[in-house]
Image (tube, helix red, strand yellow):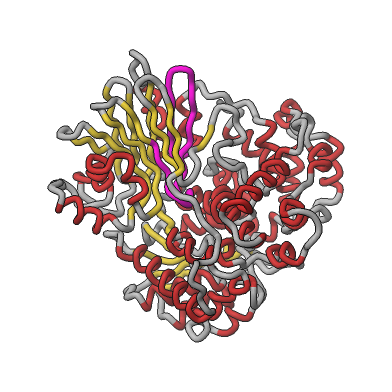
Amino acid sequence: MCGISGEFVWGDRRADVDAVSRMLPALAQRGPDADGLWASGRVALGHRRLSILDLSQRAHQPMFDPETGLALVFNGAIYNFRPLRAELERRGHRFFSTGDTEVILRGYAEWGEGVVARLHGMFAFALFDSRSQKILLARDRMGIKPLYLARSETGIRFASNTQALLASGGIDTSLDPESLHLLFSLHAVVPAPRTVMQGIRKLQPAHFLVIEADGHEHLECYWRLSARRPDQPLDDGEWRERIEAGLRRAVRRRLEVADVPVGVLLSGGLDSSLLVALAVEEGAQDLRTFTVGFEDQPEEKGSEFEYSDPVAERYATDHQATLIPNAEVLRRLPEAVAAMSEPMFGQDAVAFYLLSEQVSQHVKVVQSGQGADEVFGGYFWYPRMADDRAGDWADRFRRHYFDRDDPEMRELLANPPATDIAGEWLRGELAALETDRAGSFIDAVLALDVTTLIVDDPVKRVDNMTMAFGLEARVPFLDHELVETAAAMPPHLKLGNGGKKVLKQIARGRLPDAVLDRPKGYFPVPALKYVRGEFLDFMRDILGSRAARERGLYRPEYVQRLLAEPDGHFTRIQGSKLWHLALLEFWLQTHVDPA
């Protein structure tokens, strides 16, 4: 896991090496172990390394091979790199390192752009072919690893986070009104290729982009998720066997592909607890597990230690539980926001930030349970959508998911877009799924969530917060082969038994009954949901600041309505609307205003 950056220009120009150098400090936390820069004519590549595989200098990046003229910067983990390497060796390729980076380099020499679809893992990379003078930018199927882009008339810059692009200079930071509409409808999700800034875009998951020496671009989608039943029907028991086998395989892959110890983020819920059980069954020795909790509020508990502790005890893990007081949450909140490449409304962002700090002192790699709820139907709004029969698919979805409908958006934003951008986007996405790849409405909902919405909510949140401390998070539930199996599975095996029915069946007997039979839990940070005291003062100060007034993003009457009753305005999925407004403004003050 690392941080990558670079610039590619066309025509007779040379890449701005100084601009790429300016990006590297903004990537230092993602890769604290080494840095490197390589430049040749129209391209400059920068890299910050977090050493996970082949800890020697042979695996440092940028990686350049004089024999083929290929140069590469890569962020991620390729779980099938060993069989790919063996195949390449049979074809005559010789390797000078033992990790996964060089497999991409040699794979491109053998298969060209076809190497991307052969990779199984999480990745974002840039590969320059000096012979053809073109560059290949690629991102993994599930969008686990980010890749941000900033185009100009003469070239393109790219990096693992927006902070690096902003540090390079000359980026258009004006706000995109249509992206803001999406942001406030989809609880901070701005689907690729957009971001809230006009001058920064992101490569879509499951896509690669080829740019030629003359600036011509070719964007290709190399994978699409199908959510239709197989031609040969399976009974419930056969589906359970397939899911269990796929999950075990996903956990095993993420244990084996590392030359350093691998831990587990143990929240106390079904998903992470099941990962602990399977990791031990797959041979993990002296497994380390980590849990963080927060102070209770009258409405909600702030920790789940009562569930995580028995799991750690049952599997004899080396367990660390940390309780974070509210004063520490507020004090460290600016650091968590500084680590956000895009605005994030999820209250658990600061939780993951503080947890990652603790974990990074002990291990470099952890497995995490993100994605299980989206893949296996664990959230409360899915059954509500399924039971709602009024209107078309988009109507059924938005009534139970959107944070704000378009009329409220016009009360919130001082300059809203002319049309219902989020509604139009949703209708188009669901229509494409209905026509092409989904067997039912719920199949389409889950497919949209797991391939698009999750990418820019929990997946991005976990990447940003863990990488802020040079910690690599691996997400077995988003193994693309497991996702493909689950997408084809009938909805009753997902929504049944209060959600994630098939996972509960797999976990029964492996986990304490209390973990399986409890109501669905979330990573709680109650002080950011039930806003009062110092947290209310903080949000009031942010929204009333001179910077906020001059920006003029929100309608004052809407802000005052929320401030007058901070505990009275929640979204359909129980997020604080006041926190949304304060977070975006604070993020802009942190990242955009100083530039």
On screen, residue 45 versus residue 441, left or right, reads left
- Which residue in the rendered view is the most extreme toward the top? 12
At x 53% / y 24%, what residue is drawn? 171
On screen, residue 96 versus residue 24, left or right, reads left
Q: Is residue 270 visible?
A: yes
Check residue 151 for magenta coloring.
yes
Percent position (x, y) of residue 58?
A: 19, 45
Quadrant in the picture for residue 497? bottom right
In front here: 503 or 254? 503
Percent position (x, y) of residue 135?
A: 34, 31
At x 47% / y 59%, what residue is drawn? 478
Q: Give the residues in magenta.
A: 137-161
At x 53% / y 56%, what residue is drawn? 352
In front here: 111 or 169? 111
As drawn, 406 above or below 470 = above
Q: Give the quadrant of the C terminus.
A: top right
Q: Is residue 532 visible?
A: no
As drawn, 195 above or below 473 = above
- Which residue in the rendered view is the most extreme toward the front? 231
At x 33% / y 48%, what residue is drawn? 50
On screen, residue 40 versus residue 481, left or right, reads left
Give the tally of numbered discs. Answer: 0
Percent position (x, y) of residue 577?
A: 75, 49
As drawn, 145 above or below 211 = below
Quadrant in the picture for residue 303? bottom right
As drawn, 576 above or below 219 = below
Check residue 533 for magenta coloring.
no
Percent position (x, y) of residue 416?
A: 76, 32
